[in-house]
């Protein structure tokens, strides 16, 4: 019997701090007009002191579980797609696992930059379709502001922070994620990168001096690459699903730049009315942009059960990909799930586990 991976829950969050183009014009040599004309961005949300990638991921995850009516301990797998993890290790996904109380879930991070959400969605789908697992949580979460050079006008005007999450569940009814393509081209790795802080250039006074822990980008190169692969990946994924572009109700592209989105639409001959764009209000939230745009599409009544939707994205690596989904919605009837109450018990559980570890250390240390 065939198994399908349905998207049954969704949630998003952005930090409360809003930074407008005029605010940026006070920091670097730029103008609201330049940013709007070249990117379509007006404002973005930027992490405040208490926000981190894991804290945003947890908020989005709890909302997604609430929509799916699923308890965290029903999850088998958590994938956090991010390019701004809390640490090199442990994985941000493990911090999320602990904070939502997903006691039976495996958890790992996936790094495919802005294409990461599509990669993660596909990995979770394959795990469900193979029969290995039933329920998965896929999160795209970023605090790119923490690795943005706020003195570099080429990059600091582009990015924003936020998180979005989907719950995926196994079902026998045809639907959910039907096809996906994932591609990469490492020969373009220098087009968009954070050069230092890894094995090649470990942190040193020189790397700090040369600002190599921040995002470096060749904007025009990325622009050309993006417009080409968005069209190509969308067509491949739609073909693979045995559909045509006319069957697609909604295109939800990675929100990097309004001009890139419009160029892709021209290449696909899809009108703007069948596309979601919110880059104006969030900037480029990298791997979080597709789930955030999806949540807004649902809120605005633009995505319904039975609709065919295409997610398409591109990013550093270089990576790109697309997925075709028959939209589902929650499986389980509404039941009383209160994420805030989990938080209390989950914190108690986490503290107890830490205490047990200390006691164990004390006992073993005496021998
Ligand atoms: N304000 C004012 N001027 C700026 C500026 C800013 N924030 N950033 C760059 N400029 C200047 C440049 O210095 C350049 O000046 P010069 O001609 O004197 O050298 C001029 O504007 C034009 O720069 P250019 O790079 O040709 O602009 P562009 O039309 O390509 O737009 C981007 C720049 C970055 C908006 C565009 O290339 C882009 O969106 N690329 C893709 C980036 C992306 O999506 N990255 C994330 C991928 S997931």
Image (cartoon, rainbow, N blue to C red):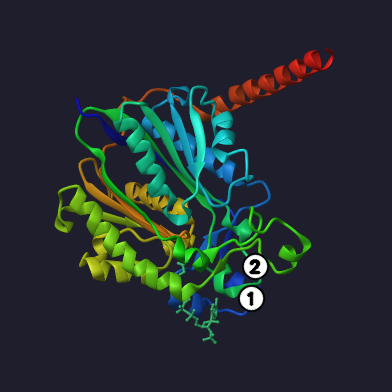
The one nearer the camera, 15 or 132, is: 132
The quarter of the rendered structure image containing the N terminus is top left
Judging by the rendered image, the residue that carries numbered circle 2 is 150
Determine the secondary structure under disc 1: loop
Horizontally, residue 196 falls left or right of residue 62, namely right
Residue at 43% across, 26% down:
76
Identify whether 145 is placed above or below 135.
below
The one nearer the camera, 157 or 107, is: 107
Mark 2 lies within 8 Å of ligand 1 (Cβ measured): no
From the top left corner, tell me how far across and down residue 89 is, in percent. Answer: 62, 41
Q: Are marks 2 and 1 in contact (CB under 8 Å)?
A: yes
Q: Is residue 8 visible?
A: no
Residue at 66% across, 73% down:
27
Mark 1 lies within 8 Å of ligand 1 (Cβ measured): yes
From the top left corner, tell me how far across and down residue 2 is, in percent. Answer: 21, 29
Residue at 61% across, 75% down:
25
Q: From this viewpoint, which residue is outermost toward the right? A: 366
The quarter of the rendered structure image containing the C terminus is top right
From the top left corner, tell me how far across and down residue 287 is, in percent. Answer: 46, 52
Identify whether 284 is placed above or below 224.
above
Crowding at dot 2, Cα within 10 Å, few <14 / some 14-19 / many 20+, comes out as some
State which quadrant residue 202 falls in.
bottom right
Judging by the rendered image, the residue that carries numbered circle 1 is 28
From the top left corner, tell me how far across and down residue 170 is, in percent. Answer: 30, 29
């Amino acid at each position: 019997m065939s198994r399908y991976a349905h998207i049954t829950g969704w949630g998003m969050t952005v930090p409360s701090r809003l930074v407008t183009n005029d605010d940026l014009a006070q920091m670097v040599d730029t103008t609201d007009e330049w940013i709007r004309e070249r990117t379509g961005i007006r404002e973005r949300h930027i992490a405040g002191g208490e926000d981190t990638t894991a804290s945003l991921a947890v908020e989005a995850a709890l909302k997604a579980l609430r929509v799916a009516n699923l308890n965290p301990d029903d999850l088998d797998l958590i994938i956090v797609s991010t390019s701004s993890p809390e640490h090199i290790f442990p994985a941000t996904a493990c911090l999320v696992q602990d904070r939502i109380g997903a006691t039976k879930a495996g958890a790992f991070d996936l790094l495919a930059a802005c294409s990461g959400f599509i990669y993660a969605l596909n990995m979770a789908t394959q795990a469900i379709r193979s029969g290995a697992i039933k329920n998965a949580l896929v999160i795209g979460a970023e605090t790119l502001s923490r690795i943005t050079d706020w003195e570099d006008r080429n990059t600091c005007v582009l990015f924003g922070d936020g998180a979005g999450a989907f719950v995926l569940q196994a079902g026998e009814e045809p639907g959910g994620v039907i096809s996906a393509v994932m591609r990469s081209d490492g020969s373009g790795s220098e087009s968009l990168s954070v050069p230092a802080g890894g094995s090649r250039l470990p942190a040193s006074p020189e790397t700090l001096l040369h600002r190599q822990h921040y995002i470096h980008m060749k904007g025009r190169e990325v622009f050309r690459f993006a417009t080409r692969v968005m069209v190509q990946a969308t067509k491949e994924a739609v073909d693979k699903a045995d559909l045509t572009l006319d069957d697609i109700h909604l295109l939800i592209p990675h929100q990097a730049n309004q001009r890139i989105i419009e160029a892709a639409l021209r290449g696909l001959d899809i009108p703007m009315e069948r596309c979601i764009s919110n880059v104006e209000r969030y900037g480029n939230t990298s791997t979080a942009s597709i789930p955030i745009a999806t949540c807004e599409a649902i809120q605005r009544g633009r995505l319904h059960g039975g609709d065919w939707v295409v997610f398409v994205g591109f990013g550093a690596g270089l990576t790109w990909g697309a997925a075709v989904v028959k939209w589902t919605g929650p499986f389980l009837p509404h039941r009383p799930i209160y994420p805030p109450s989990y938080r209390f018990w989950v914190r108690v559980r986490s503290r107890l586990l830490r205490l047990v570890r200390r006691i164990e250390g004390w006992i073993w240390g005496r021998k």
